[in-house]
Image (tube, grey):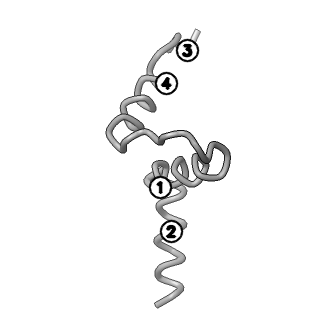
Amino acid sequence: MSWLKALWRGLRAVSGDDAYERYLAHQRRAHPGAAALSRRAFFQSELQRKWSGINRCC
């Protein structure tokens, strides 16, 4: 059963599904006194970061 959990964790890491959990771990480690974003606010900021800027091939 542990190999299945490890496989699932690896799949979540590769797909980016664990991004919020990684963000929370970073917040606790690097910014212990600061309040973390909610899940919704985190994903909205990630979408804004990803899609803002120049998006063209040439």
Whether pointer 2 and pointer 1 mark residues with C-beta atoms closer than 8 Å, the reply is yes
Lateral position of residue 29 relative to residue 7, left or right: right
Nearer to us in this view, 1 or 45 = 45
Q: Amino acid at mark 3?
A: Cys
Mark found first going from the N terminus, 3 or 1: 1
Residue 48's place in the image compared with 1, above or below, is above
Q: Looking at the image, is 24 positioned above or below residue 31?
A: below
Q: Amino acid at mark 4?
A: Arg
Q: Residue at x 58, y 43 (%)?
A: 33
Badge 2 or badge 3: first in the primary sequence: 2
Could you tell me how far apart the alpha carbons at marks 1 and 4 are, in whole angstroms?
17 Å
**Residue 24, percent across and down?**
51, 51
Q: Which residue is mark 3?
A: 57
Q: Are marks 3 and 1 in contact (CB under 8 Å)?
A: no
Residue wearing tag 2: 9
Q: Position of residue 26 (x, y in %)?
A: 61, 49
Residue 57, quarter of picture: top right
Say which mark, if any, is on residue 49: 4
User: Which structural element holds mark 3?
Assistant: loop
